[in-house]
Image: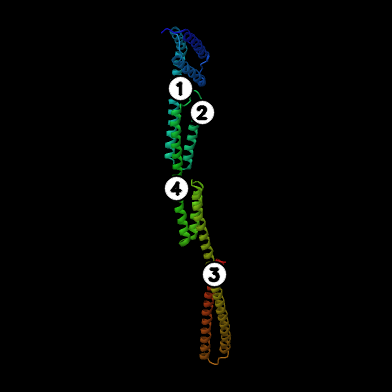
Amino acid sequence: MQLNREDWNRAKNNAIKLENEINRLSDIQCVILLDRYREFFALATEIRKYFKDWTLLREDRNRLWNMFDKIHAPISAEYGRLQENRRYASENNKDMILKGLRETYFQARGARNLTEINQARTMLEEVLSRLKNSADNSAGTLLPKDRDECWTKVKEVRETIHDRRTEINNLNFQSLICDAREALNEADSGDPRKAKALVRQVQNSLKGSAMHPEQYAQIRLVLDKAWQTADGCLKEMAKEREHRQQEFKGRMEDKIQHLQSLIRQKEEYISALMDQIEKCNELERGARTEDYADRVRGWRQEKQNRIDSVHSQIHDLESKIRFSEEKLRAIA
């Protein structure tokens, strides 16, 4: 197409400006830094638009396009290789992070106690450290899609750890609240000493059991009630035992006094018999006939037999006193 002078001059000016832009593009130092690539491709996009919108002479268009393509094509190819390498590195890094998250998930799901839950948390922290470092390490930087996938999985694993911790809390709570209620029932209607022993057992179990603070508080409330109830029962039992002991002591003391009184009576009886024996001795010495003397000796023997019998009775009474005194010493 034949251009008039004015259009021809405009086309030549456009060619000069476009060549300047292409030279600017050539001056950009395309290193690995991503922001320089952005600058390069942003300017390349503008240059393409100039080729489309500006009037150019055919020979200038061809020369300038070859000049542009000579600069743009190798950089574009290099950028494509870098992007492919970055996608490959991101995929590998993502796979390692997801592998760590899977291991953390199974550790959390299989956790049986707080120690194993904490192991899962430690594993998650290690994975998170790798995930956060991927934002600063160009060799292991994650692409946005891969990063989002990893963070989605992190959220799932966090929820799994939280849910399993809650399950363990509830299992521990259900077990220990049952034991605490057993202690309370024992205190209410069983053996208060056994109830206190159960309370101590539950308290020891609480020290190593994971639970929510409110669950701890609920169990301690039941244990406190069980302890106070058992303690009250033991004090009441001690009072009753003291009362029974005092009653028993009174009965034993009365019995001892009664036995001692019987002994005194029997000793007085023996003394009277001894006097009677002395009289028999006098009668025997003054007897006028042997027949009478024999009768007196018979009386004396009867009295001696009574004395022997009473001594035996006194011995039995003294044994009963000693037995009663031993009982008193046993409750002292």
**Visible in this render: residue 242?**
yes
Is residue 144 or residue 98 the one in the foreground? Answer: 144
Disc nearer the start of the sequence (1/3):
1
From what the image shows, is residue 246 above or below residue 53? below
Q: What residue does disc 4 label?
A: 170
**Quarter containing the N terminus:** top left
Disc nearer the start of the sequence (3/4):
4
**Visible in this render: residue 78?**
no
Q: Residue at x 49, y 17 (%)?
A: 43
User: Circle 2 — which element?
Assistant: helix
Type of amino acid under label 1: Arg
Type of amino acid under label 2: Asn
| Res. 86 mark | 1
Is residue 245 or residue 78 the one in the foreground? Answer: 78
Q: What residue does disc 2 label?
A: 133
Tag in front: 3 or 4: 4
Tag in front: 1 or 2: 1
Coordinates of residue 233 in the picture (x, y in percent) = 51, 63
Tag in front: 1 or 3: 1
Coordinates of residue 118 in the picture (x, y in percent) = 49, 39
User: Circle 4 — which element?
Assistant: helix
Type of amino acid under label 4: Asn
Coordinates of residue 30 in the picture (x, y in percent) = 51, 16
**Quarter containing the C terminus:** bottom right
Tag in front: 2 or 3: 2
Report the residue that reaches farthest toward the left: 1
User: Circle 1 — which element?
Assistant: helix
| Res. 243 mark | 3
Coordinates of residue 3 in the picture (x, y in percent) = 44, 8
